[in-house]
Image (cartoon, rainbow, N blue to C red):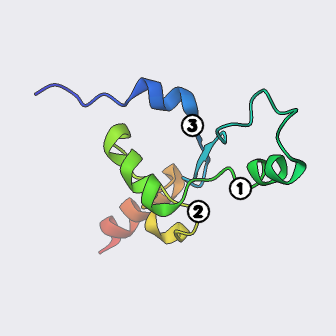
Amino acid sequence: MPKNKSHKGLLKRIRISRTGKVRHRSAYHKHLSSHKSGKRLRQLRNDPYLANCDTKRLEKLLYRRLRGRTAPLASIKRSPSPAAKRAMREAAKGE
């Protein structure tokens, strides 16, 4: 069976932080900003992280688990470090 490929167009438009949150650029903020009000431009600047429901949609395109703006860190299962793996192996041998 072939491997699943992540959506390359989406990967070019987002950044995934180390904690699994998804950062993106706000729409309507790139150019033609002279006629937009200051309030509108300020609101476009803040919170570049995706919400949980949108992040859930992107998981299907990227074939990986992601974390939304309000999801807890515990929602992501992290693989153990090499030192932790070694300790687990030694503990299993000791039993």
Dot 3: element: strand
- Three-letter code, disc 3: Ile
Mark on residue 14?
Answer: 3
Image position, residue 86 (x, y; %): 45, 56
Image position, residue 82 (x, y; %): 50, 50
Q: CA distance from mark 1 to mark 3?
A: 14 Å
Q: CA distance from mark 3 to mark 2?
A: 14 Å
Is residue 53 in sight in this rendering?
A: yes
Instruction: Determine the residue positioned at 57% across, 37% down.
Output: 14
Image quarter in which the C terminus is found: bottom left
Answer with left or right where residue 24 lies relative to residue 55: right
**Residue tagged 1:** 47
Mark on residue 9?
Answer: none
The answer to whether the residues at label 1 and label 3 have Cβ atoms under 8 Å apart is no
Is residue 79 in sight in this rendering?
A: no
Name which quarter of the figure residue 93 lies in: bottom left
**Residue tagged 2:** 69
Image position, residue 36 (x, y; %): 82, 41
Name which quarter of the figure residue 46 lies in: bottom right
